[in-house]
Image (cartoon, rainbow, N blue to C red):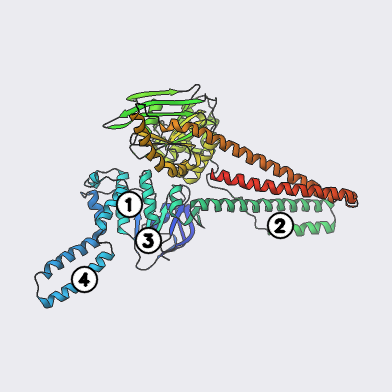
């Protein structure tokens, strides 16, 4: 065991944040700490590293073990370059290297007797140097910096000149190269693009030390962690497995607790009815029995109703009118700033599609959304909206919010026909109650601004949602609520997101913006990963062949459209077959139950002919059910594979 937290409690004034939080981390174990915003995750990390003192409880770190910590925000200063700052993490290797060079010089200047001693010293130090990575640490620095998104041309930039996100990546690089026994990371993926996140996943999955990570990136957690510590309502619960397994266990636990609660409520209600009935008899014995039951009922430890934090956020997205089948057509779109961002962009959106636009930072994804919304002019190309298309736009920078407005004013002025009560009810649905509604937009957090923007989106009744990083600043539960709302939405969605778990749950198609062009993938993020290499290899060949034949290159998304329709039709047929089979099973089981009821009829039980007929029918139904169960299992398997 490398770390143990025992009964950690922490309050700020009268507000309890952590209460008797306990868990441990084994050597080489990868652990996630999850919970809603404000659950105390960052507070717990600060207590573990000694930056904050708990009110009670104890943190124990194994003797001689080193800890490395990455905070959410970095404010590094100084004149060091990116490379120099990261190189400083390898100070012990640099010292050993300098000592080896010094010994080499000395060995050239001493006599034979002293040479033997120096050579023995040199050999021991050189073995230690090689074992600790002395021969490869410089190339490893280059690999880590590149993996986290820096180009070699940037290595000589001064850290003091970098943005906050770039400084965080430098700090993460330095931390990884220090190779502590326990790495503690607070939201490490916030400033990374998809390629960098994938690189970090692979690095941490193979890391020889232990890792504790706080992150809202559920796909990232799925790839690396083997244990989840949940902070909820100030207390901790430990789940074994990755994030998906945690979510599964959590749901089973919630359903079990709800069943126990409902069973207890039914029993309490039954006992109360019995007590009332006994009292109504108004006899000495019945009253005594009622009193006895009352005493027993008073001793029952009553369960609290299981509730999820933030489940009272209500997001229902529904278009006011239905658009035409052709929602958006983009042709030959191009945009440049200091250098070309993209050119020749072609794609179409049909009603009901949920399309994710992905790509590395700086490729122009947000620019495309802004061009569609007429916020940025295109250099070339055409944007055509379909019949009755009404856009609802979610801006990741929340520029559609007036910072001087209160929350109440922001909603009320956007929708002047709404009554004050209706405005308050809408804000309450997004967890803004009482005096919260009079806070100014400029004074609330990024996550709270995101909830205000979502509230405006819900009220828009748009049939075409364009969302730019809608899950930024949202905690995991809020993300899941948004996912459910989008999956139930009957309009069309185009969004930009780095949240791969969100993309997996919501996207029916992916557009990958790479090297200034779009590549189309019919499926979710897992499908995209599976097909990416194949399609990327095929695209240049197709385009080269077309050009040689004097034919204009056909976009991959056009070629894939027919495939998309076929896949969706097959999926719908599979869903219908599965539903029909389930209905047939239910009907057969009802018929079997009805025959079982007939067997308990005394008249039938004494009639051998009737009994024989019923048994024959029951045997027939059992045979049918066996066949239906096999069919259902096969269809379920096909649906999972699809």
For label 4, the SS is: helix
Which mark sits nearer the N-terminus, 3 or 2? Answer: 3
Question: Within 10 angstroms of label 4, few (less than 14), some, or many (20 or more) residues?
Answer: few
Real-space Cα separation, disc 1 to disc 3, in angstroms: 17 Å
Which mark sits nearer the N-terminus, 1 or 4? Answer: 4
Q: Is residue 450 visible?
A: yes
Q: Left or right? Give the position of 467 relative to 322.
A: left
Which mark sits nearer the N-terminus, 2 or 1? Answer: 1
- Quadrant of the rendered structure where residue 59 is? bottom left
Looking at the rendered image, the disc whose residue lies closer to the viewer, 1 or 4, is 4
For label 3, the SS is: loop
Front one among 501 and 42:
501
For label 1, the SS is: helix
Q: Which residue is mark 4?
A: 123
Looking at the rendered image, the disc whose residue lies closer to the viewer, 1 or 3, is 3
- x, y (%) of residue 188? 37, 49
- Quadrant of the rendered structure where residue 225 is? bottom left
Question: Within 10 angstroms of label 1, few (less than 14), some, or many (20 or more) residues?
Answer: many
Real-space Cα separation, disc 4 to disc 3, in angstroms: 27 Å
Looking at the rendered image, the disc whose residue lies closer to the viewer, 2 or 1, is 1
Q: Quadrant of the C terminus?
A: top right
- x, y (%) of residue 281? 84, 52
- x, y (%) of residue 40? 45, 52
- Give the label on residue 208, or none: 3
Determine contact: label 2, label 1, CB under 8 Å.
no
- Give the label on residue 172, or none: 1
């Amino acid at each position: 065991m490398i770390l143990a937290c025992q009964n950690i409690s922490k309050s700020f004034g009268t507000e309890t944040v952590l209460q008797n939080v306990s868990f441990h981390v084994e050597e080489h174990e990868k652990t996630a700490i999850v919970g809603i915003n404000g659950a105390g995750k960052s507070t717990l990390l600060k207590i573990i590293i000694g930056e904050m003192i708990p009110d009670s409880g104890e943190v124990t770190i194994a003797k001689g073990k080193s800890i490395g910590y990455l905070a959410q925000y970095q404010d590094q200063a100084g004149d060091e370059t990116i490379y120099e700052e990261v190189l400083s993490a390898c100070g012990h290797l640099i010292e050993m290297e300098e000592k080896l060079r010094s010994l080499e010089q000395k060995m050239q200047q001493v006599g034979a007797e002293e040479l033997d001693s120096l050579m023995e010293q040199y050999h021991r130090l050189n073995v230690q140097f090689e074992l600790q990575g002395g021969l490869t640490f410089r190339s490893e620095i280059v690999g880590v910096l590149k993996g986290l998104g820096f180009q070699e041309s940037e290595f000589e930039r001064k850290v003091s000149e970098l943005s906050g996100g770039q400084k965080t990546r430098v700090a993460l690089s330095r931390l990884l190269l220090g190779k502590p026994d326990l790495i503690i990371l607070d939201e490490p993926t916030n400033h990374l693009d998809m390629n960098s996140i994938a690189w970090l996943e692979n690095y941490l999955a193979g890391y020889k030390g232990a890792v504790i990570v706080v992150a809202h990136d559920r796909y990232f957690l799925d790839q690396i962690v083997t244990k989840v510590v949940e902070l909820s309502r100030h207390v901790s619960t430990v789940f074994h497995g990755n994030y998906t397994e945690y979510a599964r266990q959590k749901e089973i636990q919630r359903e079990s607790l709800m069943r126990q609660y409902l069973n207890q409520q039914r029993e309490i209600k039954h006992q109360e009815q019995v007590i009332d009935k006994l009292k109504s008899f108004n006899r000495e014995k019945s009253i005594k029995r009622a009193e006895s039951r009352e005493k027993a009922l008073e001793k029952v430890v009553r369960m609290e109703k299981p509730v999820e934090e933030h489940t009272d956020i209500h997001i229902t997205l529904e278009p006011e009118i239905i658009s035409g089948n052709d929602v958006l057509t983009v042709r030959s779109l191009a945009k440049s700033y200091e250098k070309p961002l993209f050119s020749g962009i072609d794609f179409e959106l049909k009603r009901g599609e949920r399309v994710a636009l992905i790509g590395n930072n700086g490729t122009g994804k947000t620019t495309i959304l802004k061009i569609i919304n007429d916020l940025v002019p295109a250099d070339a190309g055409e944007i055509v909206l379909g019949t009755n298309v009404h856009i609802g736009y979610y801006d990741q920078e929340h520029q559609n919010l007036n910072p001087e407005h209160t929350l109440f004013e922001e909603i009320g002025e956007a929708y002047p026909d709404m009554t004050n009560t209706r405005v308050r009810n809408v804000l309450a649905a997004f967890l803004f109650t009482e005096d919260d509604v009079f806070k100014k937009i400029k004074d609330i957090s990024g996550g709270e601004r995101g909830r205000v923007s979502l509230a405006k989106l819900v009220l828009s009744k748009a049939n075409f949602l364009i969302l730019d990083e809608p899950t930024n600043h949202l905690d995991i539960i809020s993300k899941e609520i948004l996912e459910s709302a989008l999956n139930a939405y009957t309009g069309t969605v185009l969004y930009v997101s780095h949240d791969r778990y969100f993309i997996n749950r919501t996207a029916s198609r992916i557009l990958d913006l790479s090297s200034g062009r779009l590549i189309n993938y019919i499926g979710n993020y897992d499908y995209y990963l599976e097909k990416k290499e194949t399609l990327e290899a095929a695209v240049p060949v197709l385009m080269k062949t077309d050009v040689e034949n004097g034919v204009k290159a056909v976009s991959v998304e056009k070629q894939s459209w027919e495939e998309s329709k076929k896949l969706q039709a097959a999926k719908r047929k599979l869903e219908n077959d599965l539903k029909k089979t389930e209905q047939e099973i239910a009907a057969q089981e009802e018929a079997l139950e009805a025959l079982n009821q007939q067997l308990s009829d005394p008249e039938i039980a004494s009639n051998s002919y009737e009994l024989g007929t019923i048994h024959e029918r029951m045997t027939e139904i059992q045979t049918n059910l066996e066949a239906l169960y096999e069919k259902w299992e096969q269809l379920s398997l096909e649906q999972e594979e699809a």
